[in-house]
Amino acid sequence: MPGKIADYFRRLSIPREVEDSLALRLSVWAAVVLSIMALATQAAINRGLAFACILLLSLGSYTSWRRRHKRNTVIKIFIAVFTLAALASFLRQVYLQPYDPRLPLAELFLWVQVLHSYDLPRRRDLMLVLISSLILLSLAASFALSAGFVWLFLLWLTAALSSMYFAQASRLLGLSATPVRGAPPPPSWKRLPVLLLVLLVMITSGGLAIGAVLPRPAFNVLRTLPFSLRRAFSPSSGFKFNNPGYPRLPVRPPENPLEVNPEAYFGFSTFLDLRSRGQMVDLPVMKVRSTAPAYWGGMYFQTYSGDSWLAAEEEPALLHAIEQPFYIEYGPGSPHLGGHEVVQTYYLESEQPNVIFSAYRPRLIYFPSDYLYQDSSGLKSPYNLSEGTIYSAVSDLIVPGEMNLSLNIEADEETFAPYLELPHLPQRVLDLSAGIKADLPGPYQRALAIEDYLKSNYTYSLDVDPLPPGQDAVDDFLFEQHRGYCEHFASAFAVLCRLQGIPSRVVTGYATGDYNPFSGLYEVSLDDAHAWVEIYLRGVGWLTMDPTPGFSIPQPSQGSGSLWILGDLLRWMGTRLAALFPPSLLSALKGVFHAMASAFVAAGRGIAYAIRRLPWLPFALALVLSLSMLYVLSRRKRRCVSPEGILDPAVAAMGNFLAVLASLGIERHPSQTVEEYAHRLSSLVPGLDIQLELGLFERVRYGREALRLEEAISINTGLKAALEKINISIKGHPG
Amino acid sequence: MSRRSFAVIALSLALVLIGINSQAGCLFWLASMLLAALSVSWLLSLFQVRGLTFERRHKQEIGEDQLLELTLSIQNRSRIPRSLLEVLDGDPSRPGEKKPRLKPPRKTIREQWHDPSAAVKPPPEEAGGQAAFLLENMPGRTKIDLMYKRGSLRRGVFNDWPGFFYSEGILGLTRHSSRVSPASRLVVFPSYASLKSFPFIDSLLHPHHTPHGVSAKGAGMDYYGVREFRAGDALRHVHWRTTARRGELVVREFETEVGVPLLILIDTQPRTESQGTCDALDSAARLAASIARYAHYAGHPVALASYKGDSLDVLQIPSFRGALQWLATVEMDARIGPEEQVEGLGRQIRPGSFFCHILPAVRFDHARAAAALPPQSHTALVFIDLASHAANGSQISSSAGGSAQIVADLQRAPFPGLFSLSLYRKGDDLRECLEKSLITFAGSRFRER
């Protein structure tokens, strides 16, 4: 009995259906190597490990090829042992770092790939390896922060397609017999690149089309969001604000205007100096993965001093979280009706001040530290945010369109007195405030009116004259310059709101940035640094508004937050294409498109007006259209169907006649009339005369006449006889 | 759609879900590319099987034990080349096949285990299945001839059996096939044994038992006389000596030899108790062909008979080839039992002639059948053992006793005119079965009226 069992296992270990295709093995090897490289380029594994894995994998693949017909019992045992070890390591890592299992998972799959490569006798094993490489690639894709990953993916796709082709060829060859004679030559290696190229083009274009309409519902079921490794911090040292672009920044505005560093935004400070003039360069700052577009706010300024905005002078509260995340709490006097949850992950690409950016208002923060600071000017990090830092936030957005903001409720002046305070302002500013529809009932309506006023009457410009000493910055913008940049618009708006009794504050941060539909990330650069305003509505909370022309608060239903990516894709492609054209041509094209759009809008308005005035018009048009279609359809139907609705026997007989002749190779060209065709037949078959039958057919088909019984019989017999004649002439017998 | 396509869809869905979870845009694109690969594969496999023509050339007639050489002409009418296209030629005996069967029947682990010879089984086209050929590369506007040999042909007349174009695309994710029915006609004759003797006929050909046939001028071997040459006479029949003497062409005339007529009746009533009745009919046709061949070349007029529904179909065979053609068409469609079939033969059996009844070994009313036979006729019964023709081998042992019992009963109480009894089991040697009848009754016991 033990001998039988041993024999059983001996037979079991003999590899069956061994795959001998070297091309298949090479292409699978290439796919796996590319997926490992993808992981390495996305920093999911370190490069040394990737290099070692590729070496081991290559050795394994070679061993597997050489020993494919052998039992490899020892190798199998080793693979099993090491796989268990890799699994144990994976479980340990997941236990130690439960927040993001992707890295341990990547390592596990990597080792399984490497180990498995030592015993791949069958095609099925190779296909499993290909699927594993896809999983590795997917893991790399989940880490990918740029569209450059696409190139690596295309290379992998080439290897994967080759593998699938060779696997299919090998499989089908195994299932097919070899013909005694006439086996066509196998595809040459020269043809394969062409085939692959065609496939790649088809799949890529198809993938782009499918990806453009693939639903991307913006919800997040994962509760542990990514953040980088924690950094140790001792809270005993206390909080100190720090902006790396302005190392010696004072706490309060200096006497002279702050000199602007074009590589750092001056608004991330304890004050916002409105006297500063300068322009930011286009440097990548961070990438944001978010379920909806938003403004990424950093600093919230409370006090207006006439030439600057100042953050509240208060000691920030220290927040401590033993386990992530931080639950951010707000005072009882700070209601918030935000119902639209936005999940964001920030990947920093350059060193930033110790400000935690997030869409207002953050509820949860996953941050690589056990401590955070919080005050009325926002959330602060205990240390500067260095390049490579990753953190996540969950915010609740107020969407004005989703709630009734026309409430005639004024803010509680006592609680929000700091946000209503103003220094002495010139009279003309007060007059202007009074003149902007101050009689509107609700604060939100008044704020909208002010926003509309500023957007309509002032120009956005980065070229602004310096602020004369002692002059109020808002007064200078409103009455002297008539142009300015976002800080000026935000300041004017906030001041005018306060004059109308609406609590307001200026916020600095970053605008949404460019959405990259390939990586799914908002790419934020330094020139996206922006200032906007939040107004307080009683019972609602702080509502974000942006008075700067050309800017608008993004709605969660816009951009990648929408179900389809098509709009984003077109926008992204448009931006990239626009960069290729000279500005003059671009503006001309814009003009044409605007003109066309205006024409369409005008036409739409005209139709809407007509419908309002003549409500019966659409129904009348629909009726006319339906009747016309019915008429056309009935005409078409009558052309080929007899009045009784049945195909006339004469038409059917002629149809059969033509079909039989077509099968004999005497086909009627579509451009030939039946009469022309009959002439051709007469020339082919001497003595053939079907004029009588033709006449009868034409009477039925085009004259829409009904044939008498004897005529119907005559056309049938006549055509049969003609067929016999033709058969005799062609085949030598009646057929 | 194949299992692999469902796997791709599942993988894409998983990627989309992970993409939604992690908002990783690349995962959405990865899923899109997978779905695109699936769509492209679907389109390519659909396209691969379109725009092709299929012609089949082969011999029109063949024996069932011979290999048929077939040539398939495949033409790609479009300019676009085809890759990894499978061409399948159906089994002529299964004209109703709707789908291509590319995969060989899967072997169980037990079969793989205990049957080391499984790997050397004949290929499907020789074992009676679809023949599959892979066209790895077929350039546009080309025609390719594939020649192969088909074995295990089943007796019958087969028309327009199907062929298939089958493609799983280049990536093997989806599959499409198109069925074609090229014009074909194939007559598969039953195989036969070249008998050296057949006791039923040989033993009874004793002079005093042999009713003499009428001599007539014909194509026999015995010399009858000479006559002047007529147009159409064979030159080898010219009698040169007389020609030389008379100075004009004179040919020899031969006597037509008329032997004892033999009528072979094949029982074509379907039997529901066994699955092997079709095989049994094939065996009956082989037995009939072997007997007819022997009798025909022995100079006996041979007639073949079977029932189609309620009507009797009798063929006086003009040639052995004619007999084979007739036997190829015999089908299991009689609606009456063996005794009624014999009764229905009526006057087809002449007194004193041979009657051979080939039928499944089932119990029937011998007395009633014997009563229907004319006097002085000789009967040979050839039984086909149904159990051994059934697919299940276990039935053979259990039912073989039944056939033996029927034979034993007849041996104990033979009906008048019964001369020999044979029992044919599947796998038996035809020649041995017929040359050495199971029971040969001594002498002929004519039915006395």
Image (cartoon, coloured by chain):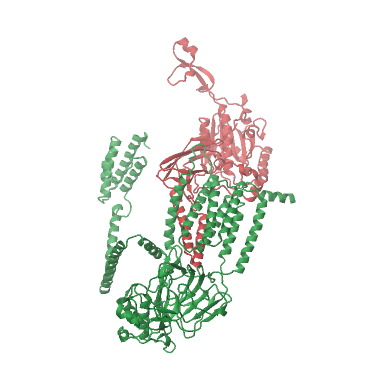
Chain colours: A green, B red
Q: Is residue A553 above or below residue A56?
A: below
Q: Furthest residue to the front?
A: A256
Relative to A411, say whether A192 is above or below. above
Q: Nearer the viewer, residue B51 or B439?
A: B51
Q: Is residue A614 or residue A42 the one in the foreground?
A: A42
Query: Where is residue A647 drawn, in percent x and y?
Result: 33, 51
How far across and down, in percent of the image, does residue A654 sit? 31, 45
* Residue extending farthest bottom: A414
Direction from residue A527 to residue A142 in the image, left or right: right
Quarter of the image containing the C terminus of chain A? top left
Instruction: Look at the image and tell me whether residue A394 can be seen.
Output: yes
The answer to whether residue B217 is above or below residue A481 is: above
Instruction: Say which of A511 and A213 sits in front.
Output: A511
Q: Is residue B136 left or right of residue A107?
A: left
Location of residue B268 by image quarter: top right
The extreme top residue here reads B245
- Total marks placed: 0
Vertical side of A346 occupied by B401: above or below: above
Q: Position of residue A254 (x, y in %)?
A: 42, 80
Q: Residue at x 32, y 39 (%)?
A: A721
Nearer-the-camera pick, A210 or A456? A456
The residue located at (45%, 66%) in the rendering is A521
Percent x, y for residue A700?
A: 27, 49
The answer to whether residue A616 is seen in the rendering is no
